[in-house]
Amino acid sequence: MSKQKEEYYWHRLDNAAKVFPAVRSSSNSSVFRITAKLVDEIAPSILTAAVEKALAELPTFHVKLRKGLFWYYWERNFQSPIIVEDSTYPLRRIDKRQSNGFMFRVTYYGRKINLEIFHALTDGAGAMVLLKSIVYFYLKQCHPDVITVNELIAETGFSQHALDEDSFLRLRKGSKRSKSPKVVPAYQMKGTRYFGERVDVTQGILPTMGVVALAKAAGVTVTVYLTSLLMYSIYQNNYKYYAEDKPIVFSVPVNLRGFFQSNTIRNFFSFVTVSLNFYEQDYTFEQVLESISHQMKDALKVENLTERIAYNVNAERNLAIRFIPLFLKNILLRAIYSRGEKGYTSTISNLGQIKLPQEQLPFVERFESLNNLTKHQCFKVCLCSLRDYMTVSFVSGMEDKDVERYFFRFLAEKGLDVQIAGNKGDEDEIL
């Protein structure tokens, strides 16, 4: 295809993406980070070449965000990404003037490759495809005689149409709801909050099978176990000192690809909501586990996921909404998003077990993930695993670390070997 024709390449934002350009602000960057920590120090020149090769293989990410009359859209970006050493706080807003128009940034520090990406471009699972492709091309240049398997081609057959699909459109039929779900004000964490871009990251590196064993013994999934522990930690160290008749409410993002057989690398996620009102009852940890497990099982039924997605897609495609000018849509979306944000205490995201070809495993130590904070959520948790180790990352805009301390001490008292890392240099104080 000639460059002249490529200049006309564009595609619409997917259903989940449309809200992010409207709501990003100084208090909400809508940026998340995933990191691959390698065994050896990162070589910047090799990393730059690896990013360029990965983008050539994944043109879905080789785009810039443009503003139309009615919607934002993606258009081919002919610039090259800028790769720099990580030197400040994570999850900052992406300024396209500093990124050659790309809505992601790749940085490095020591042995880490960081991919920070604007959520309108993709979700965690889609971003992981890009990061793993970067890691593949990086290791391929460092160890050409050892690294041979390109996982993207091996697993998906490399169908660009499948990778670029807006999978939400499959689920636009079937919604019978006439109104949006009711938002109940949630408990908001209390404490001194930082101003500006500062965020604290506290990470616990845990034995994967140890966490799995704890969850199995309790008869629940790992996500349910750690979600319940987070809720109980907030109750014990923050909530119970304030007499508020509000529930602790979590948003739990769900990767929809396994439910609806999709290989897309664009956004294809929804979220489930779990909550408990400790003002009404003094729950034990076991009772929290039982309640959260029941709520998750019900929310993850395919018919319930489909109903929620179909409502959102049909609302977007309503003619009365489609032809509202973009500046008015942005005002409407910001109001809806702000109202919805008040209904959550925090978000806990699980990227699950990250799989790599066997030949890459000796060169990669672990993966990490971080999620951005917002005005009403000054505290978020992300987790992912590689082989024998799970990384649980707390992202906080608050001074005190009582919840993190309780969370990791609880697991240590259950017999797990908990290693603490972070970006503050006071890891020894956490446990």
Image: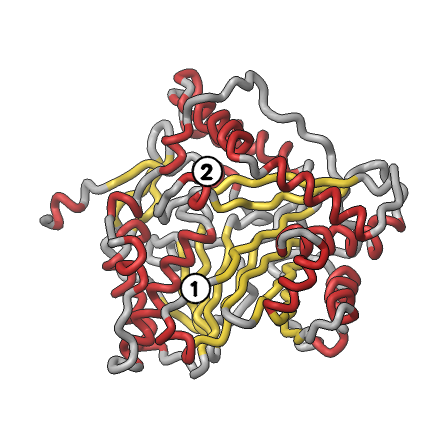
**Residue 402 location in percent, x, y?**
79, 62
Q: Is residue 337 above or below residue 152?
A: above
Q: Amino acid at mark 2?
A: Ala
Picture residue at 30% right of the left edge, 49% below the top = 60
Q: Residue 42, how many percent across, how many down?
A: 40, 79
Colour option used: secondary structure
Q: Residues within 10 Å of mark 1 (few under 14, many from 20)?
A: few
Question: Any mark on residue 16, and which?
Answer: 2
Q: Residues within 10 Å of mark 2 (few under 14, many from 20)?
A: many
Determine whether 320 is above or below 360 in the image: above
Judged from the image, the secondary structure of the residue bearing numbered disc 2 is loop
Residue 92 seen in this snapshot: no
Quadrant hosting residue 192: bottom right
- Point 33% across, 64% down: residue: 133
Mark seen at residue 355: 1
Give the camera-side residue of 240 and 67.
240
Dot 1 falls on a residue whose secondary structure is: loop
Amino acid found under the numbered disc labelled 1: Lys
Residue 111 appearing in the image: yes
The structure residue drawn at horizontal position 43% and vertical position 82%, both measured from the top left corner, is 41
Q: Residue at x 76, y 73 (%)?
A: 431
- In this orientation, which residue lies closer to the viewer: 396 or 368? 368
The picture quadrant where one finds residue 340 is: top right
Mark 2 and mark 1 lie on one chain; the one further toward the N terminus is 2
